[in-house]
Amino acid sequence: MNFWKELPKPIFVLAPLADVTDAAFRRTIAKYSRHTRKDGTVGGPDVFWTEFVSADGLCRATPEGREKLMADLKYTEEERPIVAQLFSSSEEYMEQAAALCADLGFDGIDINMGCPDKSIEKQGCGAAMIKNPKTAAAIIRAAKHGAPNLPISVKTRLGYNKDELEEWLPLLLAESPAVVTVHARTRKEMSKVPARWERVARAVEIRDAFQSDTLILGNGDALSLEDAKLKVSATGADGVMLGRAIFGNPWLFHPDKDISNVTLKERFDALIEHTKLFEELLPHKNFAVMKKHYKAYVNGFDGAHDLRAKLMEQENSEEMADILDTFLKTNR
């Protein structure tokens, strides 16, 4: 079943960010962004994405290594619909991993064709796919073979060293993915230049000229839900994927809550809960991964700098919670 066809537009989804939108943070977001709409339905991100996971690793890793990768595919029912993001340049492993994700109950599968990490590109994956369109097409077909009942989507960029949208997007559309998410920068540009949302508008035009049913989502520099709505209005995109704006703000997808109108206690409570979930769900990961969130949560108020410095010295949630509690008591 293609759940994408059932979603009301515009669609606002959570970006897959490595070592950020892990199982612990997604569960935190699901809780704090949850709200009841006027029609009685429950809102939050319209779609959740996992971090990207190596299809090759899922198929070839040792039992211990595979267990770690499987932790990245943990999810709760509150996160539905949820899409598993995979990367591979092997048709065989992509097909097997897609079948696994279908067995795990995911609602869809997304193929990463945009990551600029050099170690990923050395495997012929991520943004390197843009340079190998035949392989990219074969990988989409392999995912469809592995999970014939799930919608397959692609997240990519405007091009590799230059903007190749006019040539690259039609090649993807020819494979009829359910969704193409366009990060409005090239691989060469990384995130060093402003996202060019006029190119997302052009992607919509290309899709329409192709008479394709594929949805187009834009990605890059969406600062808030309101900003995302403006970008949809300006481009005609079917929706927006929000990424860096989620740092320190699990309320991002809540229409009435924001980091600007939650109390310091609410912010600290969310951080403590997030950290405890990290320890519970991802015990194999270095605690330093969690610390990258501290600057985002603990920011914009008197004493934040010194408080962050203290938190950086801690190695577990209990120590961190004590420091936050002391700060609240002494700064009433």
Image (cartoon, helix red, strand yellow):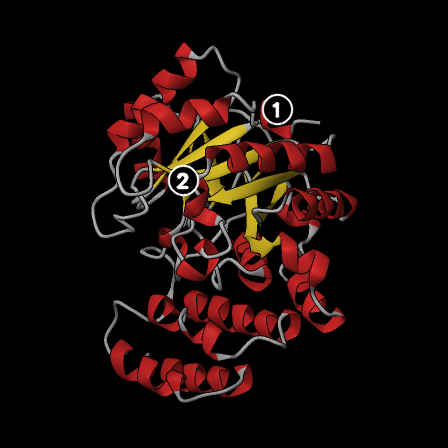
Seen in the picture, residue 101 relative to 263 is either above or below; the reply is: above
Quadrant including the C terminus: bottom left
How crowded pointer 1 is (Cα within 10 Å; few <14, some 14-19, many 20+) is rated as few
Specify whether residue 324 is in view: yes
Seen in the picture, residue 235 relative to 74 is either above or below; the reply is: above
Seen in the picture, residue 212 relative to 160 is either above or below; the reply is: above
Residue 210, position in %: x, y?
44, 13
Question: Distance between the Cα atoms at labels 2 and 1?
Answer: 33 Å
Which residue type carries mark 1? Glu
Which residue type carries mark 2? Lys
How crowded pointer 2 is (Cα within 10 Å; few <14, some 14-19, many 20+) is rated as some
Q: Residue at x 57, y 41 (%)?
A: 110
Question: In front: mark 2 or mark 1?
Answer: 2
Q: Which residue is mark 2?
A: 131
Seen in the picture, residue 155 relative to 313 is either above or below; the reply is: above
Quadrant including the N terminus: top right
Where disc 2 sits, the SS reads helix
Residue projecting furthest to the right: 103
Nearer-N-terminus badge (2/1): 1
Residue projecting furthest to the left: 193
Q: Residue at x 36, y 53 (%)?
A: 244
Q: Quadrant of residue 298?
A: bottom left
Specify whether residue 147 is in view: no
Q: Which mark is residue 6?
A: 1
Q: Quadrant of residue 209?
A: top left
Residue situated in front as seen by the camera: 72 or 134: 134
Residue 2 falls left or right of residue 100: left
Where disc 1 sits, the SS reads helix
